[in-house]
Amino acid sequence: MGTLCFHILFLILTNSFITGVYSSATFTFVNKCQFTIWPGILSNAGIDPLPTTGFSLQTGESKILNAPSSWGGRFWARTHCTEDSTGKFTCLTGDCGSGTLECAGAGAAPPATLAEFKLDGDAGKDFYDVSLVDGYNLPMLVVPRGGSGENCTKTGCVRDLNSACPSELRVMSADGEGVACKSACEAFQSDEYCCSGAYGTPDTCRPSQYSEVFKSTCPQAYSYAYDDKTSTFTCTDADYTITFCPSPNTSQKSSSGDQIPGSGSPFDSNMVYDGALAVNAATATCAHVLGAAVAFTAALWRLCHI
């Protein structure tokens, strides 16, 4: 009886440990834009993809994804997406070129605002940033929850760079609306702006007049390749909320009105899609499950010693 109880206890504790290690961070995506967006996800080379690599978020909607220990990759939003008569899915900004809702291992075509993460890096810290190195398409805010560390704080670019974008970098829609802002590297394909060739080191690649526009508007975001000192943040044991268009009226007024994969029916104003509420609910569920496991283990232990 004692041996059987020991094995059962071992399996319970081992399963709890494995579950805790696997689900090392929770990402909550919140859409506060006034239109539907289609977030894309790309894992770093050699890292397994998350359960989804692309999905839709209507106005006010949120979605939660769990990432395993040591995951690394990037998130972004696709906008002005449509599906043609053959079923091919494309987006005016942030398109990943897969032709479907899922990006399936493909990254964002610039320009696109990026949230970049490396979980459980040096000294067990999560490293994260919001990058405009590949340009900008939407305001984005990353907020850590429950973590610790001297540099564990929110970051992002919450201002509308599309309206402040220099004309030579501006991406326009067919109806003349500014929908994205290119990086100088993307616009001019120059080593000086791309921090490549003779300009491929921190000493030789300096901020340009164009990256300074990004930096002055969004001081916490990466504005060029070597903008590390003010743009990289770290947390330990945190979850993260990624909000698109965190402030009202911070980006273009509308996206495509065409019916596309995942867009569904118009948003129901009676439904509540709140990232914080969803996370609190998930946290409460985890707490109840853990409490039940502890109670069950204690009861089994007492049974074994009767």
Image (cartoon, rainbow, N blue to C red):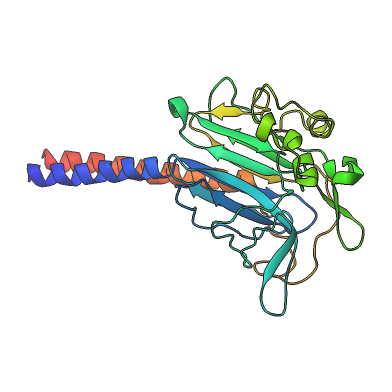
Is 194 on the left or on the right of 54, as rendered? Answer: right
Residue situated in front as seen by the camera: 134 or 141:
134
Q: Which x, y percent locates residue 229?
A: 65, 22
Q: Which x, y percent locates residue 206?
A: 74, 26
- Answer with the quarter of the image where residue 219 lies: top right
Whether residue 12 appears in this view of the structure is yes
Quadrant location, the C terminus: top left
**Residue at the (71%, 59%) spot, across then down:** 58
Whether residue 182 appears in this view of the structure is no
Residue situated in front as seen by the camera: 152 or 86:
86
Q: How many marks?
A: 0
Q: Which x, y percent locates residue 191?
A: 72, 37
Is 225 on the left or on the right of 173, as rendered? Answer: left
Vertical placement of residue 261 versus 21, above or below:
below
Is 253 on the left or on the right of 27, as rendered? Answer: right
Q: Which x, y percent locates residue 180?
A: 81, 49
Residue situated in front as seen by the camera: 286 or 100:
100
- Name the residue furthest front: 198
